[in-house]
Amino acid sequence: MGLKSTLTGHTLCDEKSSVILEAMTFPEPVISVAIEPRPRLTRKNSASRFRSSCRKTLVPRVHRSGNGQTIISGMGELHLEIIVDRLMREFKVDANVVSPGRLS
């Protein structure tokens, strides 16, 4: 049970009297880390779970680098540590965290 397609920033209201609230804006990220799923055999399975997890943890920026790493960017080291901890603990994403560009 729960709202599976809603994210932070979505507005829930009665269809008959719709409400439009101001959109949230996030500052530009200042630091990045690369996330690589540990077992190479589970990368495809981890990828969809990872993308879903990132949406739920409000990662401001997620992209793939030229060497195949998933790069997450945030507002500081603590911000990224919390995001990585949640991905691993709550969403069971088994991954290595490395500096962008460095392969594990």
Image: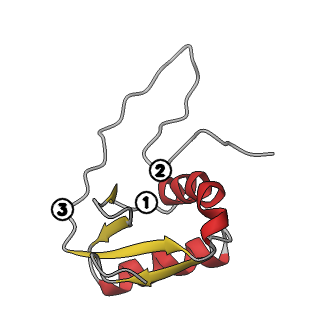
Q: Nearer the viewer, mark 1 or mark 2?
A: 1
SS for callout 1: loop
Height in image: 29 above or below 19?
Answer: below
The outermost residue toward the right is 1
Earlier along the polypeptide chain: callout 3 or callout 1? 3
Instruction: Look at label 1 and name its amino acid.
Output: Leu
Q: Which mark, by number, is residue 28?
A: 3
Q: Residues within 10 Å of mark 2 (few under 14, many from 20)?
A: few
State the quadrant of the C terminus: bottom left
Instruction: Tell me what residue is drawn at x 28 percent, y 59 percent.
Output: 66
Locate residue 9: give its quadrant.
top left
Rendered location of residue 47, percent (x, y): 56, 56
Q: Which residue is mark 2?
A: 8
Instruction: Look at label 2 and name its amino acid.
Output: Thr
The outermost residue toward the top is 16
Using the image as rendered, state which of residue 44 and residue 17 is in the foreground: 44
SS for callout 2: loop
Rendered location of residue 71, percent (x, y): 34, 66
